[in-house]
Image (cartoon, grey):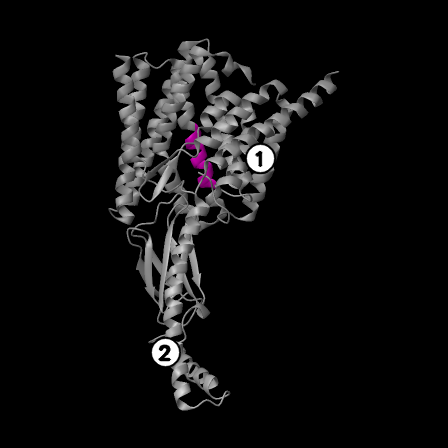
Amino acid sequence: MLCGKLRFAACMLASFLLLGLYSNAWAHKVISAAYPDGNLIEGEIGFSNGDMAKNLLVEVFDPEDNKLGETTTDEEGFFVFTATKKVDHIFRANLSAGHIATLTVTADELPDNLEGGGVAETSSSQEAVSSEEDAAVPSNLSDTNAQLVVINQVALEQLVSKTSKEVRSLRKELAQYKEERRMQDILGGIGYILGIFGIASFLLGRFKTTKGA
Amino acid sequence: MHIVDGALSNPVLIGGGVIAAAGVAYSLKKLEPEDLPRVGVLSAVFFVVSLIHVPLGFSSVHLILNGLLGIILGWAAFPALVVALLLQAVFFGFGGLTVLGVNAVNIAFPAVMVFFICRWGITAQQQNLAKLVADVLFAIFFILSIWAGVSLYEAYQTEGATWRVSVNSISLALFALVMIYGYILYRRKTLSVAGFWGFLGGSLSIFFTAVMVAISLALSGDEFAKAAEFVIVAHFPVMAVEGILTAATIQLITKVKPELINAVR
């Protein structure tokens, strides 16, 4: 009789845990990161326990609070946004219950040759031209050498893009590693608690007995 | 449950710190040295139990058990929780160092309230009176869950039929079901009077904590007012889980080692 009731109680508890407890009030830390790669900005949003924010609306603003656009995260908490202007991009996502993720990608992390950027585009293309001139003129190189420099620049950009991809995955792993709770943390915490209360008990005992005596 | 750094305004942070310090000072003054090992062990329980995570959706839930701490420790819940919260902030990044005081008050003050409300019912000699008051508290709880249902319905009206709203109404229905089930168990004498008081204490403490979290969020700015109401509704399922766990623990303690409850004052 009692056994059956206990089993029923356990079933109720399990069904609660499976069904009912969807709520985001007690997730702890919001983790978010954004990595620019060319004119694409990739980012991820999730909680410190490894759960990622799925299908979450991410709004993008410039520093003057003008909305640049919006995107949504996929099943793994990743989002991709195509930057069209060379300005600071501020990403905001509301994970509800007081959890707000804010990410900033500054303008100098974005490439100079952004398309469709209006004023920003013309100025940046001018910069690109002038930088090519700068590279070519001071060393007084011949035409073939100037071409080589341009080709080298293209190769360099490809290399940078490749490297940033590699670094991105490393950064992700590092972030996960930092958030992982290890056994020695738990045991260390318990040790600290017992130690603190041990010292407190000693001090309190001395204090109260000397006061009493 | 743990508010993070940066979510609250400075007056709230300072106020929380002052109240927490006052609570710790008062309880240390009352505390006898021989009670401290018990305080330390329950502090460690709170520290570890928050690691028992149940992943749900893109979030997760962990146990708090401040009702149990309050019933057993009374005022001593303050130092126990401050130490455990400090170490949680340092080791796991739960909450934070600046919000330590507010978090301690939000979790420890309901524990002390539960001590004054429920300790009496657990140790009562007059069983009939304890039963009557338990019935009244149960009725209040039921009215509260109806209120939560109404506010969920309003959210449904304004936000439309989002998945979150519908899942929350399911969790509310489950909470009401568990409450009724606990009441039936108690009526059929499977759950003792002390056990039922433990159930009430476990869920009441979570409810008070949710209310206090909501208040501290609402005090810090209007943008959190909506989140604050959501916090209360969202905590109903935790109330049921903690109620069951506290009831089982208290019932076991009253049978096996009743002097544990009567020890600390």
- Residue to which mark 1 is pinned: B20
Tag 2 subunit: A
Chain designation of label 1: B
What amino acid does circle 1 point to?
Ala
Residue B1 located within the stretch drawn in magenta:
no
Instruction: Give the answer, above or below, for where B215 lies relative to A173.
Output: above
Which residue lies under the disc numbered 2?
Answer: A118
Residue B171 shows up from this direction? no
Q: Is residue B252 above or below residue B15?
A: above
Secondary structure under the numbered disc 1 in the rendered image: helix
Same-chain status of marks 1 and 2: no
Left or right side of A89 for A4: left
Magenta stretch contains residue B207? yes
Residue A179 pos. (x, y %): 44, 45
Q: How crowded is mark 2: few (under 14 residues within 10 Å), some or many (20 or more)?
A: few
User: Which is closer to the viewer, label 1 or label 2?
Assistant: 2
Q: In which quarter of the image is the N terminus of chain A?
A: top left
Which picture quadrant has residue B24? top right
Residue A195: percent from left, percent from top = 59, 29
Compared to residue A59, the image places residue A9 above or below, namely: above
Residue at x-position 39% and y-position 79%: A119
Residue type indicated by callout 2:
Gly
Viewport quadrant of the C terminus of chain A: top right
In what element is the residue under mark 2? loop
The kind of secondary structure the magenta stretch mainly shows is helix
Q: In this rendered view, identify the residue nearer to me: A131 or A16.
A: A131
Q: Residue at x 68, y 25 (%)?
A: A203
Q: Quadrant of residue B15?
A: top right
User: What is the magenta range?
Assistant: B205-215
Q: Nearer the viewer, residue B33 or B145?
A: B33
